[in-house]
Amino acid sequence: MKHSMQVLGGIAVLSLLAAAAPARAATKAPAEIKIGTLYASSGPFAGISMPVYDGLKLWINQQNAAGGVYVGAFHKKIPIKLISYDDLSSTATAATLYNQLITRDKVNLLLSDSGSVLTSPAVPIAKEHKQFLFDVSGSGAAFFTKDNPYIALICLAETAIAPKYLADFLNSDGAKYGLKRIAILYSTNDFTGALAKAFTGFIKSAGKLKIVYDHGVPTSTSSYTVLINTIAATHPDAVVEMGYPGNDIAFLRNLRDVGVKFPFLFTIYSGTEIAELEHAVGAAAMTNVFSYVAGVTYQYKVNFGPTTPGFRAAWDKAYPPGSGAEWGMNALYGYHTGLVLQRVLATTKSLRQLDLRKAIFALSGKLTTLNGTFVLNSEGAQVGEIDPVGQLRPNGKGGLRLDVVYPPRYANAKPIIGKK
């Protein structure tokens, strides 16, 4: 009898050990942290995608050179493996590749490609597979809903609030500078279409400017001459053009060729991708244009990671002149994404997807990098990192600098408004 009890006791112990084995196996540190993402090497979104990809790779290379990224759940550094595919700026291709990253490659962390258009297929796919989506810069307001806990926007404010400072400047200071009539031209995609909708709402709500033109065009638009002449016929004091870099380039070229000037002109990428646009259209065509001011030109007081000059030094070392890598806002976005992932991995309880969600939400309001203060709302939309408004001026060396004109707490210059 005693022997039987010992046998049974041994079986019970073995059963408990067997039951515990999967739990122990689940908490074993992986050999590598697999980060999956897409990039566009060609097509209309290559100009914003490749700099993000290069910025992300810079962060990964730095981490791996230091022995890997520290993962708090395992109390050790673990090498990063980047798994990435070229979506060629195609949403259909992107959808297939996002599925592949989740189901075949089984990545630990899933990152979207740059911009709202190429992020759009990732949102429902990630939700369906219960894979948390680290949304790099897809700021379309429709991505963030109460029924989807599998997303957080990392690099810029959601479109519903992103144009707030621009609208505030025109509503509060516009009349002082004689800006009463406004024309709005935008590309009809998830990003700039949503931005324009929010911006128009801010202008209409304030009721201080008269909207004389409000028109959307396909993102593929490459000729703006007829549109510019149509806008000019409405006699606007202020013109706001919202598109991707290719749209801004085509618009500014045609504006230069037609010879039309507006007292106030705003484009998104003139200030955020200065080098790319200056190379394409020339400094003269961009002088006095208003734009957003990203962390590449405004130095935030950081509590994690390098300052903008420190990042620029690392960038120039990794990507010397002639490498083809474009410095600008999107390069910073890629690197900032890495910094956010670094804090998430350092503080997460595990690599389970909802634990990753808890870790990134815990950073809200506490993390300030070279891209500003990271703040999420309950649905995962970024409500911090709102870019100030700046104006491009000659830098005295044949190029351009970007001065901050609004809001007052950031401003280092007063706006220059042209004559009609």
Image (cartoon, rainbow, N blue to C red):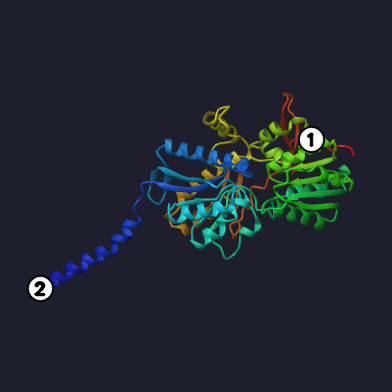
Residue at the (61%, 62%) spot, across then down: 145
- Residue 48's label in the rendered image is none
Query: How far apart in space, not on screen, are marks 1 and 2 (Cα)?
Result: 94 Å
Residue 340 visible in the shown view: no
**Closer to the camera in the image, 49 or 367:** 49
**Closer to the camera in the image, 320 or 403:** 320
Residue 60 visible in the shown view: yes
List x then y, in percent, for residue 3. Answer: 9, 71
**Secondary structure category for the residue under label 2:** helix
Residue at the (64%, 50%) spot, across then down: 384
Q: Is residue 156 above or below residue 327?
A: below
Quarter-of-image position of residue 190: bottom right
What residue is disc 2 on?
2
**Secondary structure category for the residue under label 1:** loop
Q: Residue furthest top?
A: 397
Q: Is residue 357 above or below residue 79?
A: below
Mark 1 / mark 2, whichever is N-terminal: 2
What residue is disc 1 on?
288
List x then y, in percent, for residue 7. Answer: 14, 69
Q: Give, as a three-letter code, the residue at label 1.
A: Asn
List x then y, in percent, for residue 147. Answer: 57, 66
**Closer to the camera in the image, 374 or 240:** 240
Left or right: 397 as drawn, with respect to 335: right
The quarter of the rendered structure image containing the C terminus is top right
The quarter of the rendered structure image containing the N terminus is bottom left
Q: Residue furthest bottom?
A: 1
